[in-house]
């Protein structure tokens, strides 16, 4: 089969249509590729923004939990009387009550004047400490441990044992007829937290 100029004129229109279709197809392919690239970039950007929002949301939730925990701690300390002015009369009554309820032989103590602690871990608050010298006559070590545990649990202050020395004693009778076997000499810090002026 031969192909000459007369045949070319017959297929010229079809050839032009084919070329136009090829160009249109290439254009559509290029446009689709551009749209795909744009969609991919938009997806990546949306994913990045989503991660940022999730990170901020986690941070807000963490801060909210921290505030809630600090608020709960503050309320517990305030309820126990640790936050606020020291209440020495309550402390004296507490020691008297423990001595009577535990039937302790002898409890002698003396509070030193209140002093400010050098460092404060909480902005807006100052820590105050009253040192107490404690001397007790004991039947056994349990008397001392029970006394300190009761004080720490019930006192309207945070009670820190600075040091404690227990020594054997010569047998001596008490007014109740019981004999003290040990002497305890301790130093305790009664710590309270005072809000600074302007702090709530």
Image (cartoon, rainbow, N blue to C red):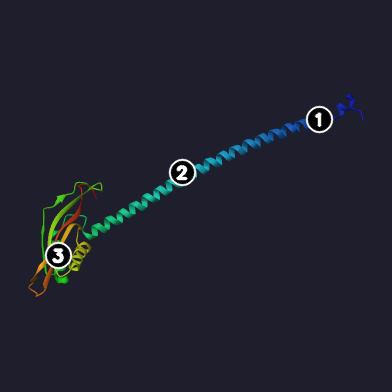
Who is closer to the viewer here, 109 or 19?
Answer: 109
Q: Nearer the viewer, residue 20 or 91?
A: 91
Are the residues tagged 3 and 1 within 8 Å (C-beta)? Answer: no
Marks 3/2 in contact by CB < 8 Å: the verdict is: no
Q: CA distance from mark 1 to mark 2?
A: 55 Å
Whether the residues at callouts 1 and 2 have beta carbons within 8 Å, the answer is: no
Residue at image x 27%, y 59%? Answer: 76
Q: Nearer the viewer, mark 3 or mark 2?
A: 3
Measured from the top left, where is residue 170 in percent x and y? 9, 68
Indicate the quadrant containing the N terminus: top left, top right, bottom left or bottom right.
top right
Residue receiving disc 1: 15
In the rendered image of this protein, does residue 179 appear above or below residue 184?
Answer: below
Residue topped by disc 3: 95
The secondary element bearing badge 2 is classed as helix
Q: Position of residue 47 (x, y in %)?
A: 52, 44
Q: Nearer the viewer, mark 1 or mark 2?
A: 2
- 93 vs 11, left or right, is left
Q: Residue at x 55, y 40 (%)?
A: 42
Which x, y percent locates residue 197? 20, 47
Q: Position of residue 27 (x, y in %)?
A: 69, 33
The mark tally for this picture is: 3
Compared with 55, 162 (above or below) is: below
**Label 3 or label 1, whichever comes before in sequence order:** 1
Kindly state the secondary structure of the residue where label 1 is placed.
helix
Residue 52 got which mark?
A: 2
The answer to which of marks 1 and 2 sits earlier in the sequence is 1
Marked residue nearer the N-terminal end (3 or 2): 2
């Amino acid at each position: 089969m031969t192909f000459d100029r007369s045949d070319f004129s017959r297929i010229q229109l079809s050839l032009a249509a084919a070329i136009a279709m090829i160009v249109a197809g290439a254009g559509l392919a290029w446009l689709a590729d551009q749209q795909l690239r744009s969609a991919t970039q938009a997806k990546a950007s949306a994913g990045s923004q989503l991660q940022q929002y999730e990170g901020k949301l986690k941070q807000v939730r963490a801060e909210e939990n921290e505030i809630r925990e600090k608020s709960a701690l503050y309320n517990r300390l305030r309820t126990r009387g640790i936050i606020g002015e020291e209440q020495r009369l309550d402390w004296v009554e507490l020691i008297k009550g423990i001595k009577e309820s535990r039937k302790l032989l002898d409890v002698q103590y003396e509070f030193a004047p209140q002093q400010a602690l050098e460092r404060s871990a909480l902005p807006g608050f100052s820590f105050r400490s009253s040192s107490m010298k404690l001397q007790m006559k004991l039947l056994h070590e349990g008397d001392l441990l029970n006394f300190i545990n009761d004080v720490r649990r019930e006192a309207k202050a945070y009670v820190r044992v600075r040091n404690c020395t227990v020594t054997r004693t010569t047998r001596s009778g008490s007014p109740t007829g019981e004999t003290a076997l040990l002497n305890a000499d301790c130093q305790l810090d009664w710590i309270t937290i005072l809000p600074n002026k302007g702090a709530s």
